[in-house]
């Protein structure tokens, strides 16, 4: 577990399984979550879990864990899969939270608001390469923002001024 901070520097969530393996089944994540007693901790602060599309397709994570306990980060390749997007929309209606991992600016305007409530960006990429118009689009569309790889005080300060919801 790694702490995930809010823009004001307070602990807001935990990054869970940050060094995940693409071969781990979602049911194994659920078992680990339960066996470690993480549900009690997730009742205080949600976990942020980066999962693969195969893990998402298995459905154990979104069927067996409470919607308030985990924010799922899904690869941007999910935009090419209508079934994944449809499932995200349905589960969001049930209170689940999904973030899309944004690796390139060309997909920013393709992110469906009905399927995702957050976008996650590498902090240095967002600061140095993401066009201001795309950053404005993210804000105007109402997406929450997660920053990852915040490795300096300078980046942390920038993330705070840009009102990111979470950062690591």
Image (spheres, rainbow, N blue to C red):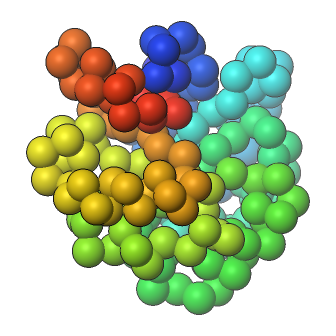
Q: Position of residue 42 (x, y in %)?
A: 74, 26
Q: Position of residue 126 (x, y in %)?
A: 24, 46
Taking 11 as reference, is 74 above or below it? below
Q: Quadrant of residue 90?
A: bottom right
**Residue 51 shows in this picture:** no
Query: Count of labels shown?
Result: 0
Instruction: Give left or right: position of 82 versus 58.
Output: left
Image quarter (top left, top right, bottom left or bottom right) of the C terminus: top left
Closer to us: 115 or 63: 115
Name the residue: 54% across, 11% down: 10
Closer to us: 31 or 44: 44
Instruction: Give left or right: position of 139 versus 32.
Output: left
Q: Position of residue 98 (x, y in %)?
A: 62, 56
Closer to us: 55 or 124: 124
Name the residue: 29% across, 20% down: 156
Q: Position of residue 80 (x, y in %)?
A: 45, 86
Taking 5 as reference, is 58 above or below it? below
In the displayed image of the protein, which residue is found farthest to the left? 128
Name the residue: 34% across, 48% down: 121
Instruction: Give left or right: position of 104 versus 20.
Output: left
**Residue 60 shows in this picture:** yes
Closer to us: 77 or 37: 77
Q: Quadrant of residue 122?
A: top left
Taking 30 as reference, is 149 above or below it? above
Name the residue: 24% across, 65% down: 104
């Amino acid at each position: 577990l790694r702490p995930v901070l809010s823009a004001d520097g307070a602990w807001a969530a935990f990054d869970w399984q940050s060094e995940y393996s693409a071969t781990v089944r979602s049911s194994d994540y659920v078992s680990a979550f339960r066996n470690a007693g993480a549900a009690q901790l997730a009742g205080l602060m949600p976990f942020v879990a980066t999962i693969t599309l195969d893990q998402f397709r298995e459905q154990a994570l979104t069927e067996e864990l409470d919607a308030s306990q985990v924010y799922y980060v899904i690869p941007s390749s999910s935009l090419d899969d209508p079934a994944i997007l449809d499932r995200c929309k349905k589960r969001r209606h049930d209170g689940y939270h999904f973030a899309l991992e944004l690796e390139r600016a060309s997909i920013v305007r393709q992110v469906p608001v009905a399927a995702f409530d957050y976008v996650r960006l590498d902090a240095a990429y967002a600061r140095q390469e993401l066009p201001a118009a795309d950053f404005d689009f993210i804000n105007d569309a109402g997406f929450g923002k997660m920053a990852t790889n915040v490795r300096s005080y300078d980046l942390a300060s920038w993330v705070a001024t840009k009102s990111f919801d979470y950062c690591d």
